[in-house]
Amino acid sequence: MVTMQNYLAIDAGGTSTRAVLVMASGDCLGYGVSGGGNPVSRGFDGAVDAQLRASATALGGSDAPLHSVTVAMAGASLELPVGLFRERFAALGLLQDVVIESDLLGTFYSGSHQDDGYALIAGTGAVAARVAGSQLAAVADGTGWLLGDNGAGFWLGREVVRAVAAALDGREQATALTELLLAELAITADRSLRTQGRVGAQQQLIAKTYGLAPIELSRFAPLVFEAVDDAVARDIIDRAAAALARTLLAVTTGREDGPLVFGGSVLTKGGTVAAAVMAELALHAPAGSTGAVPVLVRDGVVGAAVLALKRHGVVVDAAVFGRITSSLAALRD
């Protein structure tokens, strides 16, 4: 019977991987965490090793056979060697298939069991999706720091560095971000020190930021929330919210047709950007529209479990979804 099957669901992120063992009833039996498990950023072998470590913890030494493995991750549209995934997971007792799903669907289904709606994710990167009939119908942004990811962690961090660089030489107004960023980089804030006419602090800022990989600028994103009452920081937040709203609007149909799920630390921590995005969306809403209240999710592991069941013929209704969320929460505590 399908109700006796065990399914392994994995949310493979760039920095951490989460795995859960779930039954068709929605009851989660085990949970495990490991390092980054995304092959786009970690390479195939490193990614699968992380996925296997998290999975072994979720299985807890059980020798019960696995019906299937479902992995939600970025890069799901790439030509991934599913056969090699299957070979590696055979050691855990895999009986059938390995299914690769988009992390966008993992995020969406972490907030809803319905098969139509929207997801907006803003972590290091930014991407929006419309889900229709349990599939991705439209996707906007998610193009990486060079081409887009507007309003996400990298974008915020870059704007912080730019604002401080401009404040240091007088091109733009002074900002509380200057003290915060210089302290973060251990740069002396004395503006009387100059090197060939340039403020020494700015010279050090140039050297230290160009010494980082571009994506590492995302580490400075939290500074805008530490200085939320600062006019420059607030302007950065408002522009980020406007960019994220535009990304979401690019995939909408103009009518309210399903839940709205927010994921990623920029949107889910503190609520400042999420509230600003909703305010921006309200400006573009049709007359008489009440607007969807976003569901904030911490990651995509609940959605991976939902996908593991849905893709294998299990009906996930409100009751099953509730059991997934509650039993997983108990395992995480």
Image (tube, rainbow, N blue to C red):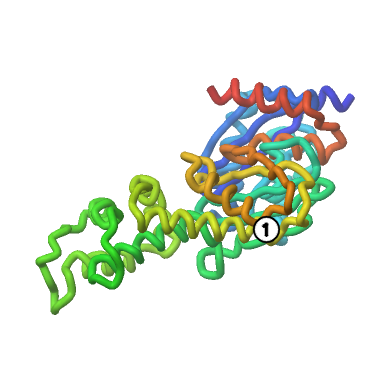
Judge the density around disc 1: few (<14), some (14-19), many (≥20) Cα neighbours within 10 Å.
Answer: some
Quarter of the N terminus within the rendering = top right
Q: Position of residue 232 (x, y in %)?
A: 36, 58
Tell me which residue sits at (79%, 38%) in the image. 114
Could you tell whether 202 is left or right of 254 in the image?
left
Q: Quadrant of residue 174?
A: bottom left
Could you tell whether 289 is left or right of 235 in the image?
right
Residue behind mark 1:
249
Check disc 1 and report its element: helix, strand or loop. helix
Q: Quadrant of residue 307?
A: top right
User: Is any atom of residue 71 visible in this view?
Assistant: no
Point out the residue furthest to the front here: 287
Q: Relative to 263, is 60 above or below?
A: above
Tell me which residue sits at (57%, 47%) in the image. 13
Could you tell whether 28 is left or right of 36 in the image?
right
Residue type at mark 1 is Leu
Tell me which residue sits at (80%, 27%) in the image. 24
